[in-house]
Image: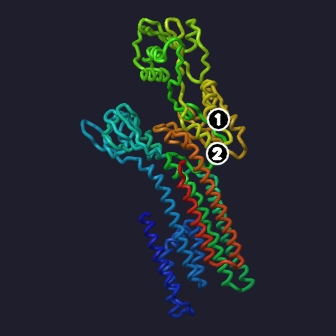
Amino acid sequence: MSRKQKKMLVRIIVAAVIFAGGLFVPQAEQFTLLWFVRLGVFLAAYFTAGWDILWKAVRNIAHGQVFDENFLMTIASIGAMIIGEYSDGVAVIIFYQVGELLQSVAVGKSRKSISDMMDINPEYATVERNGEEIEVEPDEVAVGETVVIKPGERIPLDGEVIFGSSRLNVAALTGESAPRDVTVGDEVISGCLNTDGLLKIRVTKPYSDSTVAKILELVENSSENKAKTEGFITRFARVYTPIVVAAAAMLAVIPSIITGNWGDWVYRALTFLVVSCPCALVISVPLSYFGGIGGASRHGIMIKGSNYLETLANAKTFVFDKTGTLTKGSFAVTETVPKGITESELLAFCASAEQNSNHPIAVSVVKAARAAGDIPKAENAREIAGFGIEVTVNGKKVAVGNVRLMNKLGIEISDTAAAGTVVHCAVDGIYRGYILVSDEIKEQSKSAIAELKTLGAEKCVMLTGDRKITADAVANTIGLDEVRSQLLPDGKVSALEEIYSAKPPKTTLAYVGDGMNDAPSLARADVGIAMGGLGSDAAIEAADIVLMNDNIENLPLAVRIAKKTHRIVTENIVFALGVKIAVLALAAFGLGNMWLAVFADVGVSVIAILNAMRCMRIKNN
């Protein structure tokens, strides 16, 4: 507990002890010594527990905010004291404060998981200037300056390692426990904790554009985007509270005029007021969403507001980008088909031609060739744009490229209807086979799609600009329902519109992309989910939900969190309204006393709060 919460707990305990003592003081006739003693004990307990409630009620009335829970508790408790029900009036205040304390503790636990994200912000940066190391505010460091990070310090700005090697703890950003190794030449982002060696980094972005600044902005603004249910409860309370106050007033006055039994009907009206307090709804609904957002952040799932959590819970259609989302976005040699030579010779010929290229396809070929053996030196390189390259290797003329290059040279090739990029090779005019280079499917993609379907997803679609044969192979491997290939960026949005118009009524559509070139689709979907990865500025800005660790398996986890949160919110609304309606009826007919009213208000609130706290304890499978 915080210091403030501990003080409140002490007040409640002291008030409860005084209250218990008052119960042992026998009742007596008014204005006798024993009567004054009993009244004094209960008043001491009352003001010990509830002086702040009285003050809030008076202050809010002065500001025009009359009908709130403080007003209801003040009127009900003071009214009970006036008609002589001292124990009931004090009990209302004490138990109300117990509920408020539990709410505060619950919010504190949820806020802690989010505050762990806030701890990623370092207070200073150690910068090398004029041969000295000085500490400055992170936003005072310019791009290109060198920052020194000692073991145990957080990286203050995004940059590139220019000295040292170490291991970085990225748990606060991604929820991953495994540290990441970095050395000279590696890019690092702000917010990571340096655990081992001394590092020096060259700053590549100003603080305002750094990963940590964008994440903090996301977290701080998350409470502004409220769910429809949350907004409804707020509006409901504004209308509901004045109505029940008016109903309680009529319950006290009209029957009393008819029967003349003022004490009985006023007591019923006061009981009615206590029951009617909408605390359970006003507290538990936003707390549930807050808990869901906090629980998600512990797994590296950043949700920009409770409205997106509610929207994701209703998603039945999921649309995916391919590269970087369902696949790794990194190319690798997946097949070698030599003709008349060995696999290692085929790799060596292709790599010799591609070794000076920075193209991802060329890099993957060179990497595979180095793993298989040495790469011979190439001479007389001649690149043919859009076709490939011709070189001389050990006196042999080698041509490496696509099918158009082979056709241009008049070389007959084998059937290569394979999923991926095909690199053909000819030596001295003779076809020597091909290498298949593919974007590897993420190991978790298939299981993630399967789990989404168990969670109620009715349609999983992939949109990609890749070749049909490649797209179909990926879709079949991971179990997608539909695939649309060879799409240009604007074609993706058009395809998304068609899918959106065909989705089941009263359901939502989620688009999942890598956040780099999917901004239009992310914005068009009901909820945009970005495979953020570390340092993906575009992902953090474009999406409604960001999977910071780039793990597709966190998508079904996010859906489970959203569904559980939505279910808990519904449970709390049904439970709170059901109990209140029943007890309100009992109170109106004189079948319920103030203690039952305390349960209907504070008891229901406590149960709803405890239920809402379950949103914070959602674990990954």
Rate crowding at label 1 as few (under 14), some (14 to 19) or many (20 or more) other CA atoms within 10 Å: many
Towards the viewer: 579 or 269: 579
Task: Of the two numbered discs 1 and 2 on the same chain, state the one appearing first in sequence.
Answer: 2
Element type at mark 2? helix
Could you give the CA–CA distance between mark 1 and mark 2, rounded to whole angstroms? 13 Å
Which kind of residue does numbered mark 2 sit on?
Thr
Is 401 situated above or below 596?
A: above
Q: Residue at x 33, y 42 (%)?
A: 196
Q: Position of residue 74 (x, y in %)?
A: 57, 74
Whether residue 191 appears in this view of the structure is no
Q: Are marks 1 and 2 in contact (CB under 8 Å)?
A: no
Residue 454 is labelled as 2
Q: Nearer the viewer, residue 76 or 55?
A: 76
Tag of residue 480: 1
In the picture, residue 86 is in which quadrant?
Answer: bottom right
Check the picture and name the quadrant holding the N terminus. bottom left
Looking at the image, the residue that sits furthest to the right is 258
Q: Within 10 angstroms of label 2, few (less than 14), some, or many (20 or more) residues?
A: few
Q: Amino acid at mark 1?
A: Leu
Query: In what element is the residue under mark 1?
Result: loop
Residue 525 position by quadrant:
top right
Q: Horizontal and vertical percent for residue 292?
A: 55, 53
